[in-house]
Every structure is written in structure tokens, then in C-alpha cells.
């Protein structure tokens, strides 16, 4: 089974700065990757699919990149509402569908 | 606006059963794959089950196979998760999610707010 590993577990960044979150697959998944944002007490929200395509209504400060086994979610000019937990999800050759363990983005 | 509203969660003893429901509105329910995703307390997201538009294709995570059944009623715009032989490790918030599945691209584009299931004696 393909394992998704996110790093770091927690990232501390100041508002206005940029953040880079990583997601690594234990074997190649092509571009079959999505990113979700989850705020405390809320349901997850789709940010990115196909590794780099922003979902409807997602601000341009969110960008996804990568293919194969290495993926990145970059967030520029961090706003207060961006501090949350972020999950990657792979969907190649599913089932199963698997999520990474999450990266908590916190205010520095 | 797409809305998904889960219900049916609660406290159940180990070995017991529970049926979750998800009422969908704001889109043509019968044209979408649908999934259940859960989140144990303080933990990450775990995909549980997915079904196709007609409900005749069903996929499950290994840990629930033989115990959980996903189903849908397109006439009622509703998705269900029948959970039997519940274990403490099934304790989680269960989210209903609408799926986009075209070609090799699959993702959950809308989520409900979740319903909490607690398995404890």
C-alpha cells in the first residue's frame, strides 16, 4: 500500500510570510494528488487537485506542484485564515484512497 | 449551493450497530459518486467507503470490510453508512463527501459538517 508522508508535522510562520508544505508518496502516483485545508471544528475544504489545479474559489496565493513522489503546497502572503491543518490525499489506482497525516500551520 | 447534512451519530456499545445518513441538496445527487471519510479524535482523515452513482459499485477501507455497508437512495437524495460490529477504534467524526471522478481524477469537492460516533461501554 502506498504511504503518504507529510512534513513537517508543524510549521510556524508569521502572517505575511510564505509557507511550503511537503507531501511524499512511497511510490509514484503521477499527478493524482489533492490537498485539503481543515480548520478547527470544521469540515475539510478542497484546495488543489491533480497536484496543481486550484479548486473553485481558492485564492491564487495557494499553489500546488510536483509529480511522481514529491509534492509541495505553497502558500504566499499568509493570511490569518490560512492557519489550519493541511492534508494531502492520493487517489491513483484506488481503492484505497489514502491521506497524509497532516501538517499543522501555526502562527509564529 | 451544495449542502450535505449528516445525521445518525451517537454513543453505541462495542459490538453494536448504527446507521448514518447524509441528506444532499443543491446538486443532482444521482450523478455523483459519494464517500464517507472519518476522523478519530485528534487524528487525521481516513477514507472509509465510496459508492458510484447507481450504488452498485462500492469500495471500502480494509478495516471496515464486512462490517460497514455504504448505500444510497437517489430518489431521496440520501447516502447511508450501515455500521455493524462496532469497535472502539471506529470512534470518530464521520463526514459525507461528494466526489468528482472523471478519468483518473478523483477528489472530494464538497463535505458535510460531520456526525460524531462514539463506541464505548
Image (tube, rainbow, N blue to C red):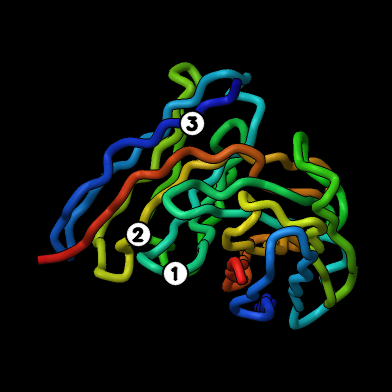
Q: Disc 2 vs disc 1: Cβ atoms closer than 8 Å?
A: yes
User: Circle 1 marks a residue in which chain?
Assistant: B
Q: Quadrant of residue B51?
A: top right
Q: Give the residue drawn at x 48%, y 42%.
A: B96
- Specify the farthest residue to the left: B121
Image point (43%, 27%), residue name: B23
> CA–CA distance between discs 2 and 3?
18 Å
Which of the two residues, B73 or A10, is positioned nearer the viewer here? A10
Q: What element carries label 1?
A: loop
Q: Which residue is painted at 76% across and 74% down in the image?
A: A22
Q: Measured along the vertical axis of the image, is residue A56 above or below residue B28?
A: below
Which quarter of the figure has residue B90?
A: bottom left
Check disc 2: other Cα within 10 Å, few if <14, some if 14-19, many if 20+: many
Q: Where is residue A92 in the image (x, y as percent from the top left)?
A: 77, 62
Residue B80, given in percent of the width and then of the height, sits at: 40, 38
Q: A103 or A46, which lies in front?
A: A103
Q: In the rendered structure, find residue B4 and report the number of the disc placed on it.
A: 3
- Between the residue at mark 1 and the residue at mark 3, the CA separation in whole angstroms equals 22 Å
Q: Which of B120 and A102 is in front in this view?
A: A102
Q: Mark 2 points at which residue?
A: B92
Instruction: Locate the N terminus of chain A and report the quarter of the image it occupies.
Output: bottom right
Please tell me whether mark 3 sits on a helix, a strand or a loop: strand
Image coordinates for residue A69, horizontal then vertical, percent: 83, 77
Q: Which residue is drawn at 54% across and 45% down?
A: B35
Secondary structure under tag 2 reads strand
Q: Mark 3 lies on which chain?
A: B
| Left or right: A105, with A64 as reference point | left
Residue on which disc 1 sits: B43
Amino acid at each position: 500500500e502506498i504511504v503518504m508522508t507529510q512534513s513537517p508535522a508543524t510549521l510556524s510562520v508569521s502572517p505575511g510570510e510564505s509557507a511550503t508544505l511537503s507531501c511524499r508518496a512511497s511510490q509514484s502516483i503521477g499527478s493524482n494528488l489533492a490537498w485539503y485545508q481543515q480548520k478547527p471544528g470544521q469540515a475539510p475544504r478542497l484546495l488543489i487537485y491533480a497536484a496543481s489545479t486550484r479548486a473553485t474559489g481558492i485564492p491564487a496565493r495557494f499553489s500546488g506542484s510536483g509529480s511522481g513522489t514529491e509534492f509541495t503546497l505553497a502558500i504566499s502572503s499568509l493570511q490569518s485564515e490560512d492557519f489550519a491543518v493541511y492534508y494531502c490525499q492520493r487517489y491513483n489506482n484506488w481503492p484505497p484512497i489514502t491521506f497524509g497525516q497532516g501538517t499543522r500551520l501555526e502562527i509564529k | 449551493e451544495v449542502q450535505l447534512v449528516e445525521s445518525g451519530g451517537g454513543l453505541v456499545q462495542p459490538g453494536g450497530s448504527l446507521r448514518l445518513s447524509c441528506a444532499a441538496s443543491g446538486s443532482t445527487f444521482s450523478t455523483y459518486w459519494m464517500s464517507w471519510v472519518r476522523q478519530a479524535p485528534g487524528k487525521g482523515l481516513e477514507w472509509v467507503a465510496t459508492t458510484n452513482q447507481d450504488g452498485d459499485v462500492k469500495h471500502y477501507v480494509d478495516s471496515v470490510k464486512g462490517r460497514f455497508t455504504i448505500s444510497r437512495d437517489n430518489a431521496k437524495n440520501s447516502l447511508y453508512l450501515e455500521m455493524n460490529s462496532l469497535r472502539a477504534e471506529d470512534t470518530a467524526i464521520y463526514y459525507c463527501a461528494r466526489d468528482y471522478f472523471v478519468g483518473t481524477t478523483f477528489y472530494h469537492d464538497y463535505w458535510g459538517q460531520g456526525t460524531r460516533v462514539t463506541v464505548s461501554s
